[in-house]
Image (cartoon, grey):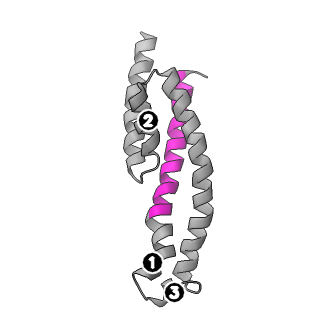
Amino acid sequence: MSLSGNLTAYRIMATIVGVLLVVLCLIGLPLHYGYWVSDAAWLAKGSGAGWQLGADISEYLGVAHGWLYMIFLLTAFLLSRKAAWPMPFTIVTAVCGTIPLLSFWAEHRATKLTRVAIEASAA
């Protein structure tokens, strides 16, 4: 696969993993564990509609995010080797995939560096 192809695969996986992580952390988990900070009936543990929605989001998106994160790590590693990223850059990029919203910054940063490598190899 070409460097451009690796970059495309990485960007797709980074976006999917980032969106799932944001939904999981900013919607699913607060709804699932919101009964700790609120006694609203719709967040009641085990019976509230909000609690059930949060539990479903946490269960299904949590598992999906975990599996897709492994694919993301593989695409990031393959891209890092092909684009000759420094090891600290590679590690920071991979770790940023676990932090909501920061993953989008890391993807932008990695794309910028890789596009420079693509232009350098074309010249």
Asked if residue 41 is positioned above or below residue 84 in the image, the reply reads: below
Q: Residue, x 60% and y 70% (percent of image)?
A: 56
Q: In which quarter of the image is the N terminus?
A: top right
Q: In this figure, what is the number of numbered marks?
A: 3
**Front one among 35 and 105:** 35
N-terminal-most mark, 2 or 1? 1
Answer whether residue 10 is magenta in the image.
yes
Which secondary structure, mark 3? loop
- Residue drawn at the location 56% of the way across and 82% of the way down: 49
Q: Residue at x 44, y 35 (%)?
A: 91
For this orientation, the residue located farthest to the top is 123
Where is residue 89 shown, x and y percent of the image? 39, 31
- The residue nearer to you, when weighing 96 against 2, is 96
Residue 52, by quadrant, is: bottom right
- Amino acid type, label 3: Ala
Q: Any mark on residue 44, and which?
A: 3
What is the x, y in percent for residue 34?
A: 45, 78
Q: Alpha carbon of mark 2 to alpha carbon of mark 1: how far?
A: 33 Å
Residue 34 disc label: 1
* Mark sitting earlier along the chain (1/3): 1
Magenta stretch containing residue 35, yes or no? no
